[in-house]
Amino acid sequence: MEQRDYFEDVYDVVRLIPSGRVTTYGAIARYLSLRAGARMVGWAMNAAHGRDVPAHRVVNRIGVLSGKHFFGSPTAMQELLMAEGVEVQDDRVVQFKQVLWDPTTELH
């Protein structure tokens, strides 16, 4: 499978994340059985700009906005999440477990 195929698979999953919810790089990687794991999902998110992909809904395994530096401003990712009702403090999703969306359990 080509790298582009991995990216498109990742984007397809990210497009399914409901507004007001977040998932992790690792959860997407597990769902897609990606060999390069969370790192590959991170690369895909970094390349997602200009596409119809809600990349702001993907955070690291403890809810930190680790990809925020790839958005237009240092606060853009937080602003997008907060506009959807996700509370963020100090670059971390508040009540992370309550808003976590895991494609492995959510997509049957």
Image: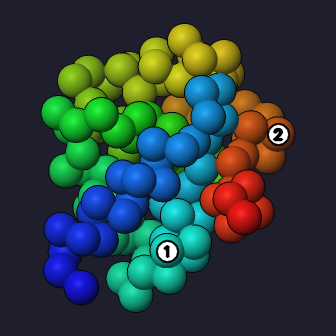
Query: Residue 100: where, in percent of width, then height?
Result: 71, 46
| Pair 1/2: label in front | 1
Q: Is residue 18 above or below residue 48?
A: above
Q: Is residue 3 visible?
A: yes
- The quarter of the picture where residue 87 lies is top right
**Amino acid type, mark 2:** Gln
Q: How many residues crowd around disc 1 within 10 Å: few (fewer than 14), some, or many (20 or more)? A: some
Query: Is 101 on the left-hand or right-hand side of 69?
Result: right
Query: Is 14 on the left-hand or right-hand side of 24?
Result: left
Query: Residue 81: where, in percent of width, then height?
Result: 53, 23
**Amino acid type, mark 1:** Leu
Residue shown at 29% from the left, 60% from the top: 8
Query: Residue 74: where, in percent of width, then height?
Result: 32, 25
Residue 32 numbered mark, or none = 1
Q: Nearer the viewer, residue 25 or 92?
A: 25
Residue 98 numbered mark, or none = 2
Q: Is residue 88 visible?
A: no
Q: Is residue 97 above or below residue 106?
A: above
